[in-house]
Image (cartoon, helix red, strand yellow):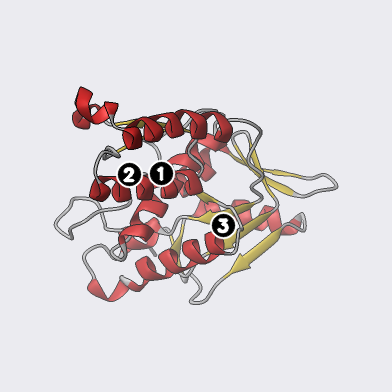
Amino acid sequence: LFAEADIPAVHESLKSPQPPLIKGEQSSKRLILFKQAVSIAEQFHKPYILFKTSGNPHTEASLVKWVNNLHWGSIAGGNRFANSHEEKPSFSEIASPSARNGFFALRRLSYILSCGKRCCNLLVLNPIGSLWVKFGNQNYHWINSELASISEALIHSHHDFDFGDENLLAAFGQVRHEKEKKLIIGDTNYSAVLIPPCINLQGKTIDILRRFTSARGKLIAMEPLPYLMDGR
């Protein structure tokens, strides 16, 4: 699934062979990267989503980093947390009260977040296809900041969402024609789809969205609207 999807969508440098999706605040990068991974896991019934935290809570500086990673990982939908093996603390560090409390907190948080089921009815299309079309063109980096703003606004207003990868939508997307109109990707149903500001959509994406709106599904499109199909 990750090979089919454009999942490596957060990049630090324009020199990367992949187009950079987000070049903004670190929090936005974390949120979008985590959300992409969680969305695919949820859509294809992978019940446990493991995040390795980079940092150990044995000093004040590392505690802040540690908590920040937990914060964004849990907001994105992660439900299993563990410390990175590369940063395994020494015995003396584990013996400190703050470290012990931190490791116990990881276990408790993992258990609590894996109980129940997420309620997520909104699918946000991933606009990475637009960046592929205009790869290397500095004038289209506004797509990056727009997606970051939308993602953070939804999270801050307590509206959970999943990202919709166009390749996976083309391969696994369906429209349910019942009392409640739903767009289905794998095992996950969505009652509303949001198209963020972008310039390109795949032809198969347009076909599925047309069927979804014909069935009276909710489609929200934000300006500027896409004007290219399959890059043409």
Q: Position of residue 63 (x, y in %)?
A: 30, 45
| Marking on residue 66 | 2
Quarter of the view holding residue 185: top right
Badge 2 density bin: few <14, some 14–19, many ≥20, Cα 10 Å? some
Q: Position of residue 221 (x, y in %)?
A: 58, 69
Q: Check disc 1 and report the residue beneath it.
A: 70
- How many numbered discs, if any? 3
Residue to which mark 3 is pinned:
206
Q: Residue furthest right?
A: 179
Does dot 3 land on a helix, a strand or a loop? helix
Q: Give the residue drawn at x 19%, y 50%.
A: 17
Q: Report the amino acid beneath label 2.
A: Trp
**At 49% from the left edge and 31% from the top edge, which residue is drawn?**
110
Q: Amino acid at mark 3?
A: Ile
Query: What is the distance, in whole Å, between disc 1 and disc 3 at their CAs?
Result: 37 Å
Q: Residue furthest top?
A: 91
Question: Element under label 2?
Answer: helix
Label 1 sits on what residue type?
Answer: Leu
Mark 1 and mark 2: Cα distance apart in space:
6 Å
Q: Earlier in the sequence, mark 1 or mark 3?
A: 1
